Image (spheres, rainbow, N blue to C red):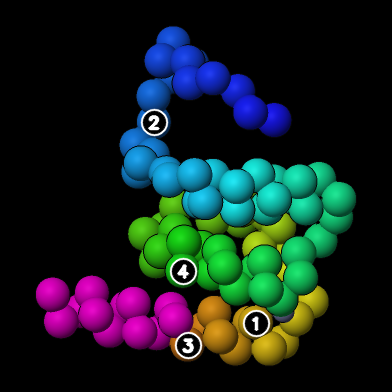
């Protein structure tokens, strides 16, 4: 799945990825195709997901696999709610 960078493919605000990040991302995408996330995988995306939720983006549509995991995993849901609280608190103080 190593595609050459194509500037015509629509640049989005993606931060520069180093090689390792790219490999991780590919692994994540492959896992996504297989089915549901493990706790590790959901946790790796939790920061990102929390920010989407806090920004009122359509987090469930953008990252349905994370939401899917949170729905069935109380441990990760606790972690998610904790992160969300921290983020909202930080926003309120800003
Ligand atoms: Zn979990």
| x 71%, y 57%: residue | 65
**Left or right side of 92 for 59:** right
Q: Residue furthest front?
A: 19
Quadrant of picture, ligand 1: bottom right
Query: First in sequence: mark 4 or mark 2?
Result: 2
Query: Is ligand 1 within 8 Å of the beta carbon of the residue shown at mark 1?
Result: yes
Q: CA distance from mark 4 to mark 2?
A: 19 Å
* Residue 53 in sight from this viewpoint: no
Cβ–Cβ below 8 Å for labels 3 and 1?
A: no
Quadrant in which residue 3 is drawn: top right
Q: Which residue is mark 1?
A: 76
Extent of the magenta region? 83-94
Q: Which residue is mark 2?
A: 12
Q: CA distance from mark 3 to mark 1?
A: 10 Å
* Residue 26 forms part of the magenta stretch: no
Cβ–Cβ below 8 Å for labels 2 and 3?
A: no
Q: Which residue is mark 4?
A: 47
Foreground: disc 3 or disc 4 = 4
| Residue 66: x %, y % from top left | 66, 63
């Amino acid at each position: 799945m190593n595609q050459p960078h194509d500037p015509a493919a629509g640049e989005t605000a993606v931060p520069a990825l180093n090689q390792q990040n790219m490999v991780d991302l590919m692994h994540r995408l492959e896992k996504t195709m297989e089915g549901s996330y493990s706790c590790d995988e959901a946790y790796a995306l939790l920061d990102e997901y929390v920010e989407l939720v806090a920004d009122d983006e359509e987090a469930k549509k953008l990252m349905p696999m994370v939401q899917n995991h949170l729905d069935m995993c109380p441990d990760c849901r606790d972690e998610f709610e904790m992160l969300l609280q921290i983020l909202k608190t930080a926003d309120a103080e800003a």
